[in-house]
Image (tube, rainbow, N blue to C red):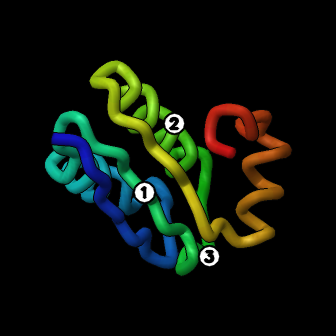
Amino acid sequence: MAGSATIQLDAELTIAQVEVWLKRLLTETPADYEMMIDASELVRVDAAGLQLLLAFKKSCAAKNVAVALFNVPKNIQELIRVSGLTQELG
């Protein structure tokens, strides 16, 4: 049975939070679901945080689970753009 689940990101997604978020993302991803990631609270992200999101999205794709990042603040959208990850995370 397909459906969707939403995860709310915290204000920071940096190297300090990557381990905790990796565990949470991996445990909250049921098969055949669409994962919605709400980034509305996100204020700060670093390269490790972007790598986590990218790796999570790729891992989900391998399981046929779609991942959508939404409510992304303008400054984070710009960071994704200059990082060359718009197609992957946009």
Q: Amino acid at mark 1?
A: Met
Q: Amino acid at mark 2?
A: Leu
Task: Please name the residue shown 42% across and 57% down the image.
Answer: 36
In screen coordinates, is 81 left or right of 34? right
Residue density around tag 1, few if under 14, some if 14–19, many if 20 or more, within 10 Å: some
Residue 54 numbered mark, or none: 2
The number of callouts visible is 3
Tag 1 secondary structure = strand
- Which mark is in front, 1 or 2? 1
Q: Quarter-wise, where is residue 44 in the image? A: bottom right
Q: Could you tell me residue 10's position as x and y percent?
A: 43, 75
Nearer-the-camera pick, 82 or 29: 29
Tell me the distance, in whole angstroms, between the alpha carbons under discs 1 and 2.
Answer: 14 Å
Q: Could you tell me residue 56's position as x and y percent?
A: 39, 37
Lower position in the chain sequence, tag 1 or tag 3: 1
Task: Please name the residue shown 72% across and 33% down the image.
Answer: 87
Tag 3 secondary structure = loop
Q: Amino acid at mark 3?
A: Val
Residue density around tag 3, few if under 14, some if 14–19, many if 20 or more, within 10 Å: some
Q: Could you tell me residue 7's position as x and y percent?
A: 35, 65
Task: Please name the residue shown 45% across and 35% down the image.
Answer: 57
Task: Please name the residue shown 62% across and 76% down the image.
Answer: 43
| Residue identified by numbered label 1 | 36
In screen coordinates, is 25 left or right of 44? left
Residue 70 numbered mark, or none: none
